[in-house]
Amino acid sequence: VDESGNFSIEVLRSALLSRFDLELPNIQQKGVRDKVEITNIEGFICNRESHWFAIRKINDRFYNLNSTLERPEVISHFKLAAEMEALQNEGYSVFCVLKSLPPPCTSEAMMDLGLPQYWWKEEDLMSGKSNAMTRADNPWKDVGSGRRLDGNAVRGGNDTSQMSEDEMLQMALAASLEQPSPSMSDRAYALTEEPEDGAPGAVKIQFRLPDGTRALRRFSESDLVGVIYAFVASKCSKQSVELRAGFPPKDISSKKEATIADSKLAGEMIHGRYV
């Protein structure tokens, strides 16, 4: 583990083996998928560059626990295999736990094992509540930044390592007031025709739209990023939307005149929110 909290798969393997006697093979490792049906696997750890997140079965439901999401998201048994394949196509390494994991939280006492501000009630998540916090005012105030091994949020840009979370939150709020997000109406971009699957130069981009729905569309890698905004506008009644991509997610409005290839957005998940 380095000073920034980055760590290798060997650290996780050693921790799981010494604490719970669990192995963590790569899902592509020979023989892994022959041993068990994918929906019978208890959990997955996904990694791309410095970003790690888990997908775990809890009460017979698979939850995507990616810290860049607004809240844990359910993955149906039917879509699990496709989700694993999509992650690998996006460049993620996927590791899996074949044996039984420790039981999920079943009591108030067990909630003390983790940070209290990150606990959600399962019934609130399943009912789609947007304020499903249980033990703190805002458990996802660092959403999009991810979490380091030491529990701190991943930071980018200016050095804020000596600032408290409240100070950084105030700084972000002040910056948002001083520099409002550019409107999608700054320039009209035409939505190009969607290329055929497998066509030369065709790339796929996933979207999490402001209303919470997901979308997947193909673009040409030579399309401008502005075309992505045109696609989102077609799904959002042309309301002003801020789009973020990468890890940690960053506003991509400054790249509207760049190509998708130059902006390295092929295969990315783009998150949108109304502004």
Image (cartoon, grey):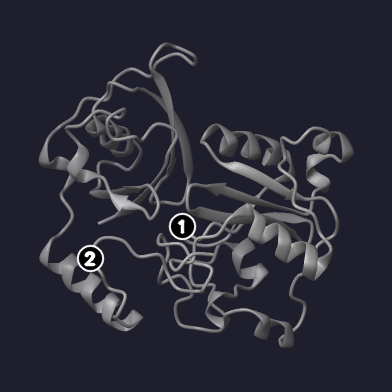
Q: Residue flagged by tag 2: what amino acid is it?
A: Asn
Front: mark 1 or 2 = 2
Mark 2 Cα shell of 10 Å, populated few (<14), some (14-19), many (≥20):
few
Q: Residue flagged by tag 1: what amino acid is it?
A: Thr
Quadrant placement of the N terminus: bottom right
Q: CA distance from mark 1 to mark 2?
A: 20 Å
Observer-nearest of 164 and 227: 164
Looking at the picture, does residue 236 appear above or below residue 156?
above
Asked if residue 1 can be seen in this view, the reply is: yes
Looking at the picture, does residue 192 appear above or below residue 40?
above
Give the left or right position of residue 33, taking residue 87 as reference: right
Check disc 2 and report the residue beneath it: 158
Looking at marks 1 and 2 on the same chain, the residue that comes earlier in the sequence is marked by: 1
- The residue furthest front is 2
Q: Residue at x 47, y 61 (%)?
A: 70
Give the left or right position of residue 106, taking residue 164 as reference: right
Q: Residue at x 31, y 27 (%)?
A: 261
Q: Residue at x 56, y 84 (%)?
A: 135
- The residue furthest right is 35
Q: Residue at x 46, y 70 (%)?
A: 140
Asked if residue 103 can be seen in this view, the reply is: no
Looking at the picture, does residue 219 appear above or below residue 236?
above
Residue 136 % position (x, y): 50, 83
Residue 132 % position (x, y): 54, 72
Looking at the picture, does residue 26 appear above or below residue 123?
above
Check disc 1 and report the residue beneath it: 68
